[in-house]
Amino acid sequence: MALLWFEGSAEAQADVDIYAVRLEKNGGELAPGPKHARITRSGLGQAMDPEQLVVTLGNTIEAGRPNEVLATIVSIGGWAMASVADIKLGPDGPVRGRKLNLSPFLNRSNLVKSPLLLFEDGHRGLPSYFELGSAYGVLARINGQGRVCDTRRLTGSGKPIQPMIVPLNALNAVAFLRDLAGSGQLLISRSFDGGQHWTSVEPAGLANPNAPVAALLLNEDLILVVANDDPHGGDRLSLLTYRPSTAAWHHLRELEANGVNARYPVLRLNEDGTILLAYSTGNKTGLRLHHFSRSWAEAGGE
Amino acid sequence: MTQIGASIAFGICAAWVGFALAGLVVPVLPASLFGGALGLALAWPFRRNIVSTGAIAIFAPFGVMLPALALHHIAISLGLDAPVFSSIEIAVFLLAYILFLVAAFGLLSVDLYRLGYSPRVVGVMTLAVCLYALATGNWFLALVAVSGQAIWAAGWSSSNWFDTVLHVTLVPIAAITLLTRLF
């Protein structure tokens, strides 16, 4: 498996490219190989259809197909002027890129951060968000041709962005959202019809100072969550569980204390049943990985 | 096909800008020749420059209406006969389009843009535009609506029909057109 991240002098600068390392088992432990630039701005610009200027790169997620990713890209301005690009990768970098059509405002301002979902009909569900003045979450449906064929909004309390959607089964799903308005609360919305409609976004009952969240389904009524739950606006990172049937939170352990500035957690369930957790540290200057078993998480981290 | 379509649309729009700028100092015919040469040069042999790649990054998808309006304007300036929109039509369009964009910004709870992904709704909207065009005798509008739907259905441009028949730069273009007619 590979780990991707964006790297440059600072976030949203014109020297940011996407880097990668391959993680391989070395005596039972996951060890990273040498890092290399996987997507460069110039390489992506030339691979885009139509060919165009790409000034900076941002959050990048797996696209649910081999050698394909979805990335936040910017051609002018800041994150509010970002678009989402579907990028096909070859051995030496992008071989094809195409912006997804998500907005009538010059195809801006949509960003990605959270992993894709799969619908039963084979379509992919892309959690994205609009962030230009106002802000709201979006679940975009992508068809077999890789084209957006429907979108649904997640709106309500605050400025909900970065929807982290966890399907519980074919019909029910939970979305955790970060509040850009700074309410200090994690936000939540639910769907009971396969993502066709979403309840009004509301506080989830967990402190969260406008920080990204990751979540992963452990069983139909237990979700593993990694979030900053500091009610005083710090930057600690905690491992928690959320039970949808009772809306109950359970704090498992503190992953990073205040001062480490741990952000942007990502959770992934591996084919061997283990879970990989990655996040940035030191105000996005470093990366930390945790590798643990699903049963350990289900047992409450004991 | 997206690359070819975007290059053609960008070339036409660049030609329009060149035509308008040259028209400030030279007559219509040489201005149109200059604009055409500029658009062709930027869209094809010199397409890998920061102006072309930057403009495509910012303005694509161009859709059908914007380049069609550019050709329409140049054609009328050259004395060709083509239907024109009334001031009331432009004012109603401007108001409706601004409401559409406001909804897209999430400032209205209704999401009109997502209707442009649905083949059934797009079919109804195209038919409605064609019926209006028939009633007013505006073949230009029908041509844009039908070619926009054809390009959308073929997958040669945006997956949202609204992007093929509208463009956000139509707001300043419509506003300036209205102002020049009023004053």
Image (cartoon, coloured by chain):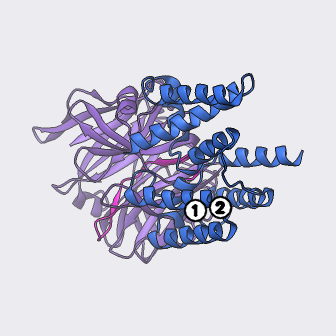
**Residue A108 lies in magenta, yes or no?**
yes
Seen as rendered, the residue at the extreme right is B183
Query: Which is nearer the eye, A238 or A269?
Result: A269
CA separation in Å, label 2 and label 1: 7 Å
Kind of residue indicated by mark 1: Ala
Q: Which chain gets the purple colouring?
A: A
The reply, left or right, for residue B78 in relation to residue B6 is: right
- Residues at badges 2 and 1 in contact (C-beta under 8 Å)? yes
> At 50% across and 54% down in the image, what residue appears?
A102
Q: Do labels 2 and 1 share a chain?
A: yes
Looking at the rendering, the stretch of residues picked out in magenta corresponds to: A104-124
Q: What element carries label 2?
A: loop
Kind of residue indicated by mark 2: Asn
Query: Badge 2 local density, few (<14 within 10 Å), some, or many (20+)?
Result: some
**Residue B9 lies in magenta, yes or no?**
no
Query: Which is nearer the eye, A229 or A35?
Result: A35
> At 39% across and 26% down in the image, what residue appears?
A42
Q: Colour of chain B?
A: blue
Q: Is residue B62 above or below residue B99?
A: above
